[in-house]
Image (cartoon, rainbow, N blue to C red):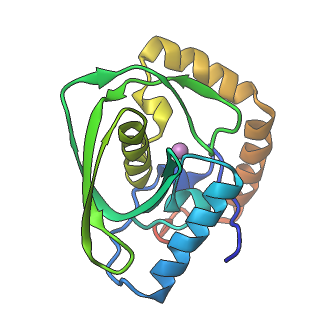
Amino acid sequence: MPIQEIRLFGDPVLLTPAALVLDFDKELRTLVADLTETMLEAPGAGLAAPQIGVPLRVFTWNVDDVLGHLVNPVLVLGDEMQEGEEGCLSFPELSYPTPRAMRAVAAGFNMFGEPISVDGTEFLARALQHETDHLDGILFIDRMKPTERKLAMKEIRESEWFNQSSEVGRKISIKESPHGLFGRNT
Ligand code: NI
């Protein structure tokens, strides 16, 4: 399975809500394998399909040496919150304090279409929330406190990778039609 290029902040696919998976086929299993391999190579604690340019509701995680994946997840969050630093493979080398629910139960399907549910606290709960957000086009910076987010955005805009990726983004946007962005990268 090939390692895929991870899309960086500035790429419109990261802001696009992903579509439900309808076919639990070989293609889906290849996607899960690609996500897993790309996540492990990075290395990262989680990776969502839009981050490799595939706008489908699938993500993988690697928390406490346990690998998992979930298709079409639905989250139920506990009331108690946790504080802690969070990063994202689409924001290389940066992490910021990001409030999250302490507990998250994610229900969905495995790559064979069997219903599964994952009950996570602390870091696993954080990963489940972060990755499910990716499927809705929501990024961890959107979950930060406004004052801290402002400072983070300044640092992100000044980062070398952002300036490189946004240059690429500008070149692409000149050529693209404004219509039919959704699902274009499958
Ligand atoms: Ni992320």
Q: Residue furthest bottom?
A: 26
Spot occupied by residue 133 in the image (x, y as percentages of width and height)? 39, 46
Q: Residue 43: horizontal and vertical position, in percent?
A: 67, 49
Residue sitting nearer the eye, 44 or 144: 44
- Locate residue 81: give its quadrant: top left
Q: Which percent across, then down, holds residue 178?
A: 54, 62
Q: Which residue is painted at 77% across and 39% down in the image?
A: 161
Q: Is residue 6 among what the camera can see?
A: no
Q: In which quadrant of the rendered view does residue 123 lie?
A: top left
Along the line of sight, the residue nearer the viewer: 97 or 183: 97
Depth order, front residue of 110/162: 110
Residue 121 occupies which quadrant of the picture?
A: top left
Q: Quadrant of the C terminus?
A: bottom right
Residue lying at 43% horizontally and 42% vertically, measured from the top left: 127
Q: x and y percent of residue 20 in the render?
A: 32, 69
Against 14, residue 114 (above or below) is below
Quarter of the image with the N terminus is: bottom right
